[in-house]
């Protein structure tokens, strides 16, 4: 075996090992989730109105002309004593959003609702900077945060504030719902993936006392927790994950309320989805770079430390998926040319075991929404196949983001455009925030679709069909991402 062949096999094996370990952690979360579901729910007592604490609602905004009025209306409808409620509109906009905000505030003035339109002198720190700027002016004991595309129910505060049952409870996070899940195949697959995070992952970790994360919106912080953890930092693109780890490493407890849903809008265009994915995956890598060593050094239970490590490194799965995919074709040739290494190539069976673990993870999530084995399985089979294919197709784009995060390369915070898409007839075409530019990575994605299509042909040429399903999904995934990227850019 040459040095190059050895390196190919070694890298391929290491990537498979990481994917396998990651899938085992997800399987353990699935076990924790089912264990939790068997325990009877303990109702949270709702206190008398006289003892409600003061709350500040922060709405970080930047160029949100299509959704800002809907957001203000929803927050103004919160069922909470008005004299205890402060609403901060943290507006960094440079378009007509500010005028829309001002008009909406005036419409609510007569109702006695305390709405404050806050404009910073500059946009330093992006969302984190805006939240910190507002925090210094916040009068509430608790801070509720909503992004522009969220629509909280009127009883949101009365269902979350009572969950702060202990003085060391620092955060209460709620589950995201989806206003436009059935808008398109793209939004349906996003909902499929997010539901697993907001069902099995968050609830599983929280039930075992492991670290979870505030998801940037649709949650409530205890103000003293933010201050104690050092406030909002802008040195990562996921300021929410960063502050979550700083707070929990200081001993603060987080609570996750799966039963409280806060709906929001999913990106309907591939460009917007890629922008969101880039920010999430790069920010997670930046946070891992910032906190991983401290997690390893802090005296924590082994299982909590293990889950925290894989939580911080979860965006690295895209690097492993991409490398495994790229090396799978050379591996087919090596398997054919070096039959003596047959036992080593059986490492590929780890992919099947990993797939089974992910099947359990995502099936459990979908089952919670249908509560029927037949209905769940019928919906699950196509959605899981397409979701996994699309995730693979995004692996190149997300790998670029993760590597930049690990290397410490800083880029601006690019917010995900929202277009108030609820019904299928709603359109984002020709909207001001539609993304029109085609990134050079898109062309590489098209090239990879052709590369993995060759892998399908190679399976028949070598009469080795072990990786054929993998190459079919890769071809479909990269091809779909490529076509969606071009089509949505053209439509814009």
Image (spheres, grey):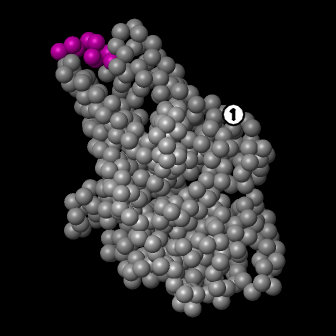
Q: Image point 52% across, 49% down: which residue?
A: 369
Estimate the x, y position of residue 415 in percent, counting from the top left.
61, 57
Name the residue tied to disc 1. Answer: 487
Estimate the x, y position of residue 199 in percent, counting from the top left.
46, 54
Read off the magenta span: 332-340
Label 1: few (<14), some (14–19) or many (≥20) C-alpha neighbours in 10 Å: few
Q: Quadrant of residue 88?
A: bottom right
Let me know if residue 133 is in the magenta part. Answer: no
**SS of the residue at dot 1?**
helix
Q: Image point 66% across, 33% down: which residue?
A: 486
Q: Say if 5 sits above or below 266 in the image.
A: above
What secondary structure do most residues of the magenta stretch adopt? helix
* Residue 65 appears anywhere in the view: yes
Let me know if residue 338 is in the magenta part. Answer: yes
Q: Image point 70% across, 69% down: which residue?
A: 74
Estimate the x, y position of residue 460 in percent, counting from the top left.
41, 10
């Amino acid at each position: 075996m040459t040095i190059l062949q050895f390196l190919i096999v070694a890298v391929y094996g290491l990537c498979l090992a990481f994917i396998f370990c990651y899938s085992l952690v997800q399987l353990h979360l699935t076990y924790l989730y089912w264990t939790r579901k068997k325990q009877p729910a303990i109702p949270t007592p709702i206190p008398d109105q006289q003892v409600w604490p003061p709350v500040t609602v922060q709405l970080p905004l930047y160029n949100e002309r299509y959704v800002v009025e809907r957001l203000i209306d929803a927050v103004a409808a919160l069922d909470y004593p008005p004299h205890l409620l402060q609403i901060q509109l943290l507006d960094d906009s440079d378009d007509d959003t500010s005028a829309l905000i001002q008009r909406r505030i005036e419409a609510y003035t007569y109702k006695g609702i305390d709405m404050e339109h806050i404009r910073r002198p500059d946009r330093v720190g992006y969302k984190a900077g805006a939240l910190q700027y507002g925090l210094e002016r916040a009068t509430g004991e608790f801070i509720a945060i909503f992004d522009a595309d969220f629509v909280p129910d009127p009883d949101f505060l009365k269902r979350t504030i009572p969950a702060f049952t202990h003085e060391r409870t620092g955060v209460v996070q709620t589950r995201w719902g989806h206003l436009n899940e059935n808008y398109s195949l793209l939004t349906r697959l996003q909902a499929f993936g997010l539901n697993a995070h907001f069902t099995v992952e968050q609830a599983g970790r929280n039930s075992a006392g492991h670290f979870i994360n505030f998801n940037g919106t649709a949650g409530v912080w205890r103000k003293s927790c933010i201050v104690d953890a050092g406030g909002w930092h802008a040195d990562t693109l996921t300021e929410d994950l960063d502050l979550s780890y700083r707070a929990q490493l200081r001993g603060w407890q987080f609570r996750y309320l799966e039963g409280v849903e806060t709906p929001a809008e999913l990106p309907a265009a591939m460009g917007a989805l890629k922008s969101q994915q880039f920010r999430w995956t790069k920010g997670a890598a930046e946070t891992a770079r910032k906190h991983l060593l401290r997690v390893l050094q802090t005296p924590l239970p082994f299982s909590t430390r293990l889950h925290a490590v894989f939580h911080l490194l979860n965006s690295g799965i895209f690097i492993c998926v991409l490398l495994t995919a790229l090396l799978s074709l050379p591996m087919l040739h090596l398997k054919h040319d070096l039959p003596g290494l047959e036992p080593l190539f059986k490492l590929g069976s780890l992919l099947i075991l990993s797939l089974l673990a992910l099947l359990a993870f995502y099936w459990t999530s979908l089952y919670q929404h249908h509560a029927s084995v037949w209905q769940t399985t019928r919906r699950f089979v196509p959605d899981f196949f397409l979701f996994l294919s699309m995730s693979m197709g995004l692996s190149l784009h997300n790998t670029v983001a993760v590597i930049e995060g690990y290397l410490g390369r800083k880029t601006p915070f690019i917010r995900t455009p929202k277009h108030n898409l609820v019904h299928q007839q709603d359109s984002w075409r020709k909207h001001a925030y539609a993304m029109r530019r085609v990134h050079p990575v898109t062309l590489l994605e098209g090239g990879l679709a052709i590369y993995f299509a060759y892998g399908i042909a190679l399976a028949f040429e070598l009469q080795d069909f072990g990786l054929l399903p993998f190459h079919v999904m890769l071809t479909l995934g990269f091809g779909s991402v490529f076509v969606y990227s071009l089509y949505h850019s053209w439509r814009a």
